[in-house]
Amino acid sequence: MFLGDGMSVPTLAAARTLLGQNQGRTGEESQLSFEDFPTVGLAKTYCVNHQIADSACTATAYLCGVKNNYGTIGVTAAVPRRDCAASLVKANQVASIAEWALQDDRDVGIVTTTRITHASPAGAFAKIANRNWESDYDVLDEDRDPTLCRDIAHQLVHSYPANRFKVILGGGRKKFLPHTMYDEEGTQGDRTDGLNLIEEWEANKASQNVTYKYVWNREQLMNVSQSPPEYLLGLFEGNHMKYHLDANNETEPTLTELTEIAIRSLSRNENGFFLFVESGRIDHGHHDNLVHKALDETIHLHLAVQRATELLSEEDSLIVVTADHSHVMAINGYTPRGSSILGRSNEVGDDGIPYMTISYTNGPGARGHVNGSRVDVTADDDFGSNAWMTHAEVPLEDETHGGDDVAVFARGPHHALFTGLYEQSRIPHLMGYAACIGPGLHYCNATSTMRSSIFLIFSLYLLNTLFRRR
Ligand SMILES: [Zn+2]
């Protein structure tokens, strides 16, 4: 499963146009790799108590198959946000498709460009009343007891199902390290309980007598890529991984490289695997009105999916590509064909001032009016640079998510199940059905029971016929 965090339908149209324009074409006619998949559907993203969702309740929907409350992960809607006690009640906890896969002796991996403890990947393993409780300090900071409500990093290392994940690749070392320590690149740890969870992960694996490796940069990752250990933990940044536009590709792996090594590693299990890959910073680019970065991160998801389609057979591997929620980015009319998708419209507002082809309804890019009129954002000193914020209407420190539906693309066995418009929480049930794991398993059993019944009836018929002839 591939997730573009915040990859709204307009983001797809803008990213494919940028992709084509980067290749010297007009752009609009381009296609992202997964836009070529045979089935596309739409998912409704609202959560139980919010019209416009976040990455926590949506992760619970598309990984665990139930909708729940905004800001909560792996628990039902019986758990209000920050209600530590309610989240500990077993009946309020839900299993993810990663757990369904493990129960069928398949392997599991998670890959992201954000902190590995961030909401989307956490949907595969965490049961927590607040997505922000990524380290024990984050739990303490809200006056909850981290020895009762374990933080997400702790759950990743010590709790089922994540303690059985074979591949864990992303950013976010600081959530694993004590605050008295600095990581390999100088980021200070977050933890106040003194735990070094990276060392504890290594010690756990050593005690199980399995092969394992912790890597923190691209070179170390490439060194294990040909024969990966059974268990691989890669944390490539203290915080989120850098935007690809800002990253040093010599020292930092790309999403495509992470995806490839994850697939190579997990493919060794003959029973198969579940892999979750997130391009997590599309969302961050949008939140900061940095549209070029949001679109570039979308293009990197396209590249990672393209690599996966080369490595995995359409005959036996289902690939689903979707987003968790939308954003309030709009593509404004009416520039001519082939105009830079990152540029200004060829038209001006009724006030005579230019506007951008892409703008946001809200966010930090909002500029105050000068002498009662809008400012010309194309006159900014940094106009056209990667760090330039495009125009937004309502001033907000963070641009918001959008409430519109997201697209779901599917290729491989049972891909046609993903057509139509449905609740986001249906997605893992469809994947489970296709893979014969989880709650969908009884359908597979029913099919084989039916096959054996038909065989039995046919055998009886045959015997009967033979007997009569005699
Ligand atoms: Zn977001």
Image: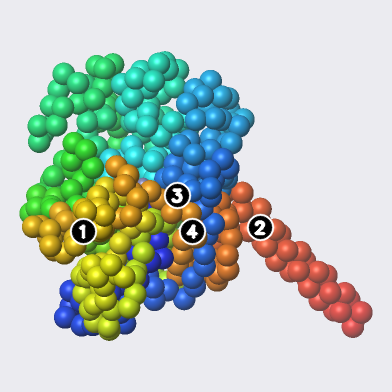
Question: What is the distance, in whole Å, between disc 1 and disc 2 at their CAs?
Answer: 60 Å
Mark 2 element type: helix
Q: Where is residue 55 drawn, in percent x and y?
A: 42, 45
413 to 73, vertically: above or below: below
In the picture of the structure, the residue carrying the numbered disc 3 is 106
Q: Nearer the viewer, residue 170 or 448?
A: 170
In the picture of the structure, the residue carrying the numbered disc 4 is 404
Mark 4 element type: loop
Question: What is the distance, in whole Å, between disc 4 and disc 1 at their CAs?
Answer: 29 Å
**Sequence order check: which comes first, mark 2 or mark 3?**
3
**Sequence order check: which comes first, mark 4 or mark 1?**
1
The amino acid type of the residue labelled 4 equals Asp
Question: What is the distance, in whole Å, between disc 1 and disc 3 at their CAs?
Answer: 57 Å
The amino acid type of the residue labelled 1 equals Val
Tag in front: 2 or 3: 2
**Which residue is found at the position 13% from the left and 45% from the top?**
217
292 to 147, vertically: above or below: below
Q: Residues within 10 Å of mark 4 (few under 14, many from 20)?
A: some
In the picture of the structure, the residue carrying the numbered disc 2 is 443
